[in-house]
Amino acid sequence: MQLAKRLNRLPPYLFVEINERVGELRARGKDIINFGIGDPDLPTPSHIIEHLCQAAHDAVNHRYPETGGLPELREAIAEWYGRRFGVTLDPAKEVLPLIGSKEGIGHMALCFVDPGDLTLVPDPGYPPFSLGTILAGGEPYFMPLKEENGFLPDFEAIPDDIADKAKLMWLNYPNNPTGAIAGLDFFEGAIHFARQHDLAICHDAPYTEVAFDGYKPPSFMQIPGAKKVGVEFHSLSKTYHMTGWRIGMLVGNADMVNALFKVKSNLDSGIPQAIQHAAAEALRGSQKHIAEHNAILQRRRDKLIKALNEVGLTARIPKAAFYIWARIPQGYTSIDFAKKLLDEVGIAVTPGTGYGREGEGYVRFSLTISDDRLEEGVSRLSSWSRRRR
Ligand SMILES: Cc1ncc(COP(=O)(O)O)c(C=O)c1O
């Protein structure tokens, strides 16, 4: 048997060592608090589940769905973008439901990348941005996200010949893993840069509804020129706590939406229809849980930041997304520090290098663990810092 060479181009999975260590420690009976996973711990709101159950009983929804999604869901997505961001979308041409945004992100590379093509990808960044390019035979060019630049890419620093050669640029705000945010002026700059170099933009925005201190993250689609050069990926995963149901969406430039539809219609058979009905209900129904969930996450954020400062980990206070990107003390690699936290305090975090070379010197804590586990983690960190003094 000979597997395709493209599989050898995928980088080694950096979390293997940490995951194995978590397994070993748990097998020895050690209680590990896992701050590593970005998956909401609170349940999907019950009105959405009730709608899903009703739709599951309807035999119409037992058959193959259409790749393009139910017209009702496309309309609900367009209406939601109108209400939330004041953005007008044509549900027939500028909206495409996805089997979770990760699926669409991975497949988008097939629409743009021929062997040897370049894409511009943030570092640190959500791994599927670069892995999609690699699987399609292309090369990611990494744009460093530096703390001194607010974790925004510096377009001026990208050599002209690279920008001219690249076909696609990935952006993601509110950002995973740094928790950084971007304003409309940044998106305007990105569109200007894309037009100068004939680039398409894919903005990934699953965290626009997870925000704190009264902040409301904008959408890239709010910029009048956005539809000419790009699209936005969004998701119901984080907003409605629906990670397990697998549903997201792509909106924006009709040609890019159609290109992804073309790829997907040859590879998948759409999203189970009962889930599409539940998603339309989520987007159209009560949104009151969003503020409630954000208040819970904000309280967790404040407690954890305080504990991290006590142990000498410095972190910006994130205004959105549910991650704390903490700078580790000098003298450790991020993997070594993650192992130390695991061995000495029983706390699992994600080493920054899992998101790219620029992640060295950082670890990521996710706020999506229950309040009592978070409290336990905070108290372990505090007693660790007292022991080390
Ligand atoms: C930046 C980013 N984009 C996309 C996703 C994937 O979300 P979905 O559940 O819609 O596939 C995640 C999930 O963690 C993410 O952090």
Image: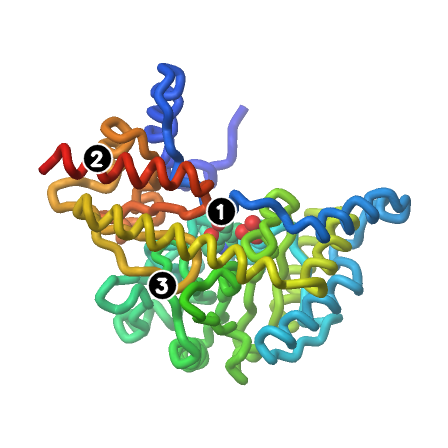
Residue 328 coordinates in the image, percent (x, y): 20, 46
The answer to whether mark 2 and mark 3 are in CB contact below 8 A is: no
Mark 3 and mark 1: Cα distance apart in space: 28 Å
In percent of width and height, residue 327 lies at: 22, 51
Mark positioned earlier in the residue sequence (3 or 1):
1
Q: CA distance from mark 2 to mark 3?
A: 30 Å
- Identify the element where label 1 is drawn: helix
Q: Residue at x 32, y 48 (%)?
A: 304
| Above or below 5: residue 187 | below
Taking the image as shown, residue 260 lies to the left or right of residue 362, namely right
* Residue at which label 3 appears: 180
Residue for point 67% across, 53% down: 264
The quadrant of the picture occupied by the N terminus is top right
Q: Which mark is residue 383?
A: 2
Residue type at numbered disc 1? Leu
Q: Residue at x 45, y 78 (%)?
A: 191
- Please name the residue that numbered disc 1 is placed on: 135
